Amino acid sequence: MNLTQLEMFNAVARAGSITQAAAQVHRVPSNLTTRIRQLEADLGVELFIRESQRLRLSPAGHSFLRYSEQILALVEEARMVVAGDEPQGLFSLGSLESTAAVRIPPTLARFNQRYPKIQFDLATGPSGTMIDGVVEGRLSAAFVDGPVMHPALEGMPVYEEEMMIVAPAGHAPVTRAREVNGANVYAFRANCSYRRHFESWFNADKATPGRIHEMESYHGMLACVIAGAGLALIPRSMLESLPGYDQVAAWPLAEKWRWLTTWLTWRRGGKTRALDAFIALLNEERS
């Protein structure tokens, strides 16, 4: 079974005549007759009741027509999605929690207003999870901590994040990791790039964090720090958006560790019209 057979079947079903259908699809009648017979043989049923020069749909033909029309409509929709004048179709975007919370909401609002035919979906999580989603094709693109070194991916830098070490109120200023050696830390799961950055900051100063408590949100991390239970590493843009941020002490990491770049990444050679439109909007906002 192929699309040509379905198109011919639909034409015959509408016209009720091989000759008239052949004229509509610009084929010779014998070609249509052969293709319809092949389709019936493939399905193992007769799709038409043949009466002299007329063809009427059989009960099986009526049932099959509904599916045939749906299949061809979906094919046409797919053609429009990838080659139409206006971007449309599904656009699944992944993002770091902090980026989704404070960086991209205005961008997403403008994107939805400008391209109403795009079906937008947003997923959040640590960089490792987002990269896996793009590589596996579950996400069209994702905001992750960069630079992105995966051979199957390409991308572009978008945001600079200033990384802040967050401690309970009244804590002495933290200038290096040895000053907080053994302190408990609140962070995301092990595949979070910010957590790895925090651990690297400790290791580079020959210091070691105490117990690492895995959290699901920055709100949870901040609540634990406010309670005096340990430290966290939070981007400044995220920290200053959280209720209660004025109840903690915070300092940027030393210059070598202070800045991280958020990248938008996608599969190499896998750009879609929706992704091109999203990148164009990001470039507009940055210019």
Image (spheres, grey):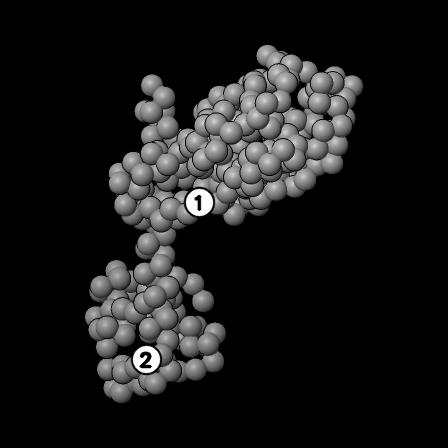
- Pick the residue in front: 137 or 42: 137
Instruction: From the top left corner, tell me how far across and down residue 16 is, in percent.
Output: 23, 77
How far apart are the alpha carbons under marks 2 and 1? 40 Å
Residue 200 picture location, percent across and down: 70, 24
Q: Where, by quadrant of the figure, is residue 100 drawn?
A: top left
Q: What's the mark number on residue 105?
A: none
Residue 65's place in the image compared with 202, above or below, is below
Residue at figure coordinates x 32%, y 55% from the top left = 76
The amino acid beneath tag 1 is Leu
Residue 44 rendering spot, x and y as whole percentages: 47, 80
The secondary structure type at the circle numbered 1 is: strand
| Number of marks in the rendered image | 2
Q: Quadrant of residue 34?
A: bottom left
Does label 2 or label 1 sit earlier along the sequence? Answer: 2
Q: Position of residue 119 (x, y in %)?
A: 36, 49
Query: Is residue 269 in view from this perspective?
Result: no
Query: Residue drawn at (33%, 74%), measured in percent from left and top?
Result: 65
Cβ atoms under marks 2 and 1 closer than 8 Å: no
Amino acid type of the residue that numbered disc 2 sits on in the rendered structure: His
Q: Residue at x 36, y 21 (%)?
A: 286
Q: Residues within 10 Å of mark 1 (few under 14, many from 20)?
A: few
Which is closer to the viewer, label 2 or label 1? 1
Q: Using the image, tell me which numbered label, if any, was put on residue 62.
A: 2
Q: Nearer the viewer, residue 208 or 19?
A: 208
Residue shown at 33% from the left, 19% from the top: 287
Quadrant of the drawing holding the N terminus: bottom left
In the shown orientation, is residue 186 left or right of residue 74?
right
On screen, residue 124 versus residue 5, left or right, reads right
Q: Which residue is mark 1?
A: 122
The secondary structure type at the circle numbered 2 is helix
Look at the image and tell me whether residue 168 can be seen: yes
